[in-house]
Image (tube, helix red, strand yellow):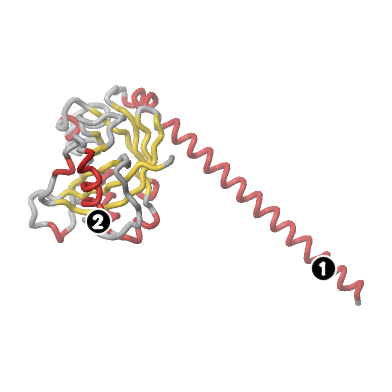
């Protein structure tokens, strides 16, 4: 009987061991594939590669949000009007591009990035309206940016629609009021994100028009996704 049990244990241990080895190998392969994908994507999104791809030196970087399949070049010009109606190549296009406020640079404490959102359109920033739902935010709280080849990661701390107070567009930082401004942005969020903020935070604001029917009576209605810079 003891001999039988011994053989039975051996027969059980072998397949379990093989399963564990296979599981570990699969995890290792998945991790390596993810790393390769990230490295490849980072190279493809480098400033030089994108400038060459679109033959446009106005490109200063890229923005990506995995959960929304957003992976776009960031344009920068001497005003905020040109890329409102021009594509990455600099050709006229009513859908415009994703572009950074002309007053910003890579060292700005507050970055403001714009993109169109036409009703029933497939513009990249139209996808930002998914953030109306807290459940979507919980799974997709990060924004990745490469700016002048510097890789950055931002964590979203506020999502809301602004209809009358556009002081967030003031990019001249008053350090005595900065924390107060951050608290105001956070207090307007549709939901609590649980992300802490401080006077030292560098922030990113994504702005697009909102098609939320609750705000249709307002002439100006901008969806704002506001995030703070964290360790990449």
Determine the residue positioned at 52% across, 43% down. Answer: 34
Q: Is residue 148 left or right of residue 119?
A: right
Residue situated furthest front in the rendering: 176
Q: Residues within 10 Å of mark 1 (few under 14, many from 20)?
A: few
Q: Residue at x 31, y 51 (%)?
A: 157
Element under label 1?
helix
Q: Nearer the viewer, residue 125 or 173?
A: 173
Q: Farthest bottom residue?
A: 1
**Image location (x, y in percent) of residue 86:** 20, 31
Q: Mark 2 falls on what kind of element? A: loop
Residue 39 picture location, percent across and down = 49, 35
From the image, tell me which residue sits under label 2: 189
Above or below 140: residue 96:
above
Q: Quadrant of the C terminus?
A: top left
**What residue sits right under mark 1 in the picture?**
9
Give the x, y percent position of residue 115.
Answer: 23, 40
Q: Say left or right for 63 vs 170.
A: right
Residue drawn at 32 percent across, 26 percent down: 54
Quarter holding residue 53: top left
Q: CA distance from mark 2 to mark 1?
A: 58 Å
- Few, some or many C-alpha atoms within 10 Å of disc 2 (few <14, some 14-19, many ≥20)? some
Q: Of discs 2 and 1, which sits in the foreground?
A: 2
């Amino acid at each position: 009987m003891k001999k039988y049990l011994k053989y039975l244990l051996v027969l059980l241990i072998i397949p379990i061991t093989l399963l564990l080895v296979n599981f570990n190998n699969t995890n290792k392969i998945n991790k390596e594939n993810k790393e390769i994908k990230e490295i490849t994507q980072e190279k493809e999104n480098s400033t030089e590669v994108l400038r060459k791809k679109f033959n446009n030196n106005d490109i200063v970087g890229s923005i990506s949000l995995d959960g929304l399949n957003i992976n776009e070049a960031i344009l920068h010009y001497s005003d905020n009007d040109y890329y409102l109606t021009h594509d990455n190549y600099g050709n006229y296009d009513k859908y415009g591009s994703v572009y950074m406020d002309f007053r910003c640079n890579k060292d700005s404490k507050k970055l403001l990035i714009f993109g169109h959102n036409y009703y029933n359109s497939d513009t990249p920033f139209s996808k930002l309206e998914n953030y109306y739902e807290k459940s979507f935010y919980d799974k997709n709280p990060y924004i990745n940016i490469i700016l002048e080849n510097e890789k950055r990661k931002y964590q979203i701390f506020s999502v809301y629609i602004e209809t009358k107070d556009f002081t967030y567009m003031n990019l001249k930082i008053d350090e005595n009021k900065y924390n107060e401004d951050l608290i105001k942005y956070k207090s307007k969020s549709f939901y609590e994100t649980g992300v802490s903020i401080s006077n030292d935070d560098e922030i990113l604001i994504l702005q697009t028009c909102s098609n939320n029917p609750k705000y249709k009576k307002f002439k100006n209605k901008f969806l704002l996704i506001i995030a703070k810079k964290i360790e990449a």
